[in-house]
Amino acid sequence: MRRDSKQRFDTVVLPHVHAGYNLARCLLRNDQDAEDAVQTAAIRAFQGIDGFRGSDGKAWFLSIVRRSSLNVMRQKHPQTNWEGGAEDEIPDPNTPNPEQFLMKSFDADLVTRALDSLPPGLKEMIVLREVEGMAYKEIAAVIDHPIGTVMSRLSKARRQLQAQLMEQMR
């Protein structure tokens, strides 16, 4: 192992391990599976750190975590519909803004249950954008899809999350 590889790994990957765990935990819904996925991703990132030429270590590492998590999902639940019907939809301008809706004082458990009810692909969008604060361009790099797909899936995820929250509040 070269010393500069370890230093580069420490700089590029280690600051994003917590974000990787958040993403894996959201996708896998299991602490142990999430830890395993992040550990596998960290090993892969370490092995590939010399080939990393980008400037966004977070997006690079989270894309590895995502693939690792998807592999775990496929092994444990081969029938999981990953995309969750994330086809493009035109947002309804009369619907209240989901961010404003979430900003109200909701019980954290209520939001967690609503998030857990989303299909994995849509839940991933909410976690990457709203929890991890990633830009659309970064999310596009993580999921390896165009920015337009990120925007439409995020819109759909927000609408479904809002609907779940409203349903749970009844």
Image: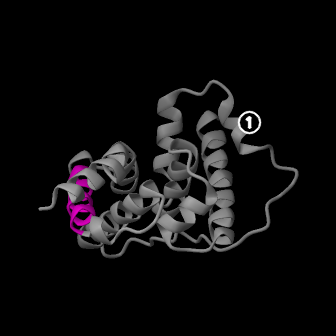
Residue 87, quarter of the rendered image = bottom right
Is residue 40 placed above or below 102 in the rendered structure?
below
Residue 35, x across and y down, in percent: 23, 50
Is residue 163 placed above or below 70 in the rendered structure?
above
- Residue drawn at the location 34% of the way across and 68% of the way down: 70
* Quadrant that contains the N terminus: bottom left
Stretch in magenta: 33-47
Name the amino acid, label 1.
Answer: Gln
- Viewed as shown, does residue 117 lie left or right of 100? left
* Most foreground residue, 15 or 23: 15
What residue would you read off at disc 1? 100
User: Is 115 a magenta residue?
Assistant: no
Residue 94, x across and y down, in percent: 88, 50
Q: Which element is circle 1 on?
A: helix
- Residue drawn at the location 35% of the way across and 75% of the way down: 79
* Most foreground residue, 62 or 90: 62
